[in-house]
Amino acid sequence: MPEGKLYLVGTPIGNLGDLSPRAVRTLERVDFIAAEDTRVTLKLLTHFGVKKPLLSYNEHNRAECGPRILNRLLAGESCALVTDAGMPAISDPGADLVCLCAGAGVETVIVPGPCAAVSALALSALPTQRFCFEGFLSTANKSRMEHLESLRTERRTMIFYEAPHKLQRTLDDFLKYFGDRPLSLCRELTKVHEEVIRTTVSEAVARFAQTPPRGEFVLILAGAPEPEKPAFTQEQAAALVAQYRAQGMPLRQAARRAAEDTGFSKNELYQLALSETDAESETDA
């Protein structure tokens, strides 16, 4: 019997209209659906008129349920994996099931859908060229402290998830570890009361100290600012080029490295070094 496939199906993060036609067809055609919360998924299926067997797969039962799902896939059944909202396997135990399938040679197929992290990033008005997803911070003090400490100098835009009852502690920690930076807080995305708050860490701390937060949050935090480079004179920059060349670097590489260190143009330093080389040659002649 041919092996089945695991389908990772993205589900709406709020607006049911975001479930794609392909996602609906996939849910209709698989043999069974593995869901984070079967009650939540049943409401979604009922809305679209889909009737399929459901089984629970979540943080609490993944060690037991994962192998069972894999055995059914190896027996030829197909399964759709869904979360309550968004993409399975992103800050989600579905990642373990994907690894199990990969190790057993079972094909996994992606059926893309909404993702709260990327949606919030797009709305944040913060740099999006480079970013890192940090998910939920641990509630355990030691691992939480180590996580935050490791991000002090992170220059990419950072994405965090947070529950409303933990938000104030997280904002306080942001201020402690990162200082006052631009911050966007996104909640109720794609829903009637969607809200994007573009502010700073200190202003957010003050705001939610007065107004209790509601709804799940995606926090988009600006990365660490570029460190200020010390001021160099042209002579000092040229001396740095000479130092790098003495270490065995070719002229162009030495000029580029010195330019990165000093803020001068690499072409300027390259031409300056050439001029000095020519001057030395004339002196020797």
Image (cartoon, rainbow, N blue to C red):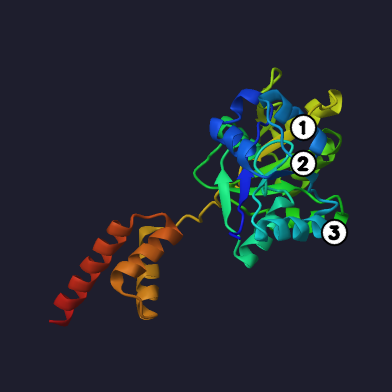
Q: Which of marks 2 and 1 precedes in the sequence?
A: 1
The structure residue drawn at horizontal position 64% and vertical position 48%, both measured from the top left corner, is 133
Q: Position of residue 110 (x, y in %)?
A: 56, 47
Q: For this view, does 84 lie left or right of residue 74? A: right
Q: Is residue 19 visible?
A: yes
Q: What percent of the width, then of the height, locates residue 155? A: 58, 50
Give the total number of marks visible in the rendering: 3
Residue 216 seen from this side: no
SS class, disc 1? helix
What residue sits right under mark 1 in the picture? 42
- Residue flagged by tag 1: what amino acid is it? Leu
Pick the front one: 130 or 187: 187
The residue that label 3 is drawn on is 142
Question: Mark 3–mark 1 contact, CB under 8 Å?
Answer: no
Sequence-wise, the earlier of marks 3 and 1 is 1
Judge the density around disc 3: few (<14), some (14-19), many (≥20) Cα neighbours within 10 Å.
few
The answer to whether marks 1 and 2 mark residues whose Cβ atoms lie closer than 8 Å is: yes
Q: Nearer the viewer, mark 2 or mark 3?
A: 2
Q: Determine the image quadrant of residue 259.
A: bottom left
State the residue position of label 2: 54
Marks 2/3: CA–CA distance: 38 Å
Nearest to the eye among marks 3 and 1: give it: 1
Q: Seen from this angle, which residue lies furthest left?
A: 285
78 or 228, which is in the foreground?
78
- Secondary structure type for disc 2: strand
